Image (cartoon, rainbow, N blue to C red):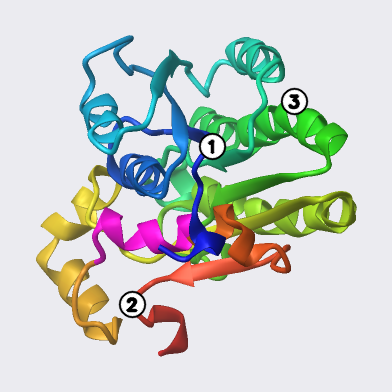
Amino acid sequence: MSASFDLTGKLAVVTGAKRGIGFAMAEALAEAGADIIGVSASIEASGSAIEAAVTSHGRKFEAIACDFADPEAVVRLGAQLAQRPIDILVNNAGTIRRSPAAEHPLEWWDEVLRVDLTSPFVLTQAIARGMLERGRGKVIFTASLLTFQGGINVPGYAAAKSGIGGLTKALANEWTARGVTVNAIAPGYIATDNTQALQDDPDRSRSILDRIPAGRWGQASDLGGAVVFLSSSASDYVSGVVLPVDGGWLGR
């Protein structure tokens, strides 16, 4: 591995690390040399699959359970992690609720905005203070194709992920000159539990595949290269970017 992509000695926090995209990102960072603090609502204290994956690469793993729908729990998590020398923060934890906008329950709207936008900001604010004091750090958000588009039947999710795009740029404007880069990765249609309803709908799945130049649904592992790049010194002059990893969807 090129030295500019080597994360040996770095400590990374990955939220939503128990499964899906977060799992793949955490494993990719571990393979590149980083020790991992994995955060998820229901992650086991020990013996999880992501712990096994990280330690198989010779890296240390620590699990922290936190429900991102609980504002007080997120504040406590931020205070806890603010005491640690975090080099990389990957804000990946999220949720989605599907319902036509005219019938979309307000409690769903509130939940999605809290989990997908407010909680990542609260956690980033807490951890980035230490990064700014040390003059170095990498902050990465998981955005979405709906950072650029409106989607269908997911008004809260589209609003939250559009907000993530704006937040990425706002924080980059303030922090890049102080040594902390802030970027986001916008996954395309990735085969995870969050997209299972779309995968199971023959018409929607076919229409999605017809538009993807790569001709397939993405796999969580397709996000690994992007997160390692944005976490490494190879991206030191990259900040305020929302990087699509979408099989060519947005270029169609």
| Among numbered discs 3 and 2, the one appearing first in the sequence | 3
CA separation in Å, label 3 and label 2? 34 Å
Magenta region, mostly helix, strand or loop? helix
Determine whether the residue tagged by mark 3 lies in a helix, strand or loop: helix
> Which label sits in the foreground, 2 or 1?
1
Out of 153 and 223, give the one closest to the viewer.
223
Which residue is label 2 attached to?
247
> Which label sits in the foreground, 3 or 2?
3
Determine whether the residue tagged by mark 2 lies in a helix, strand or loop: loop
Q: Residue at x 86, y 33 (%)?
A: 133
Q: Residue at x 16, y 75 (%)?
A: 206
Q: Is residue 40 left or right of residue 48?
A: right
CA separation in Å, label 2 and label 1? 32 Å
Look at label 2 and name its amino acid.
Gly
The dot on residue 233 is none
| Magenta extent | 218-228
Q: Is residue 75 left or right of residue 136?
A: left
CA separation in Å, label 1 and label 3? 22 Å
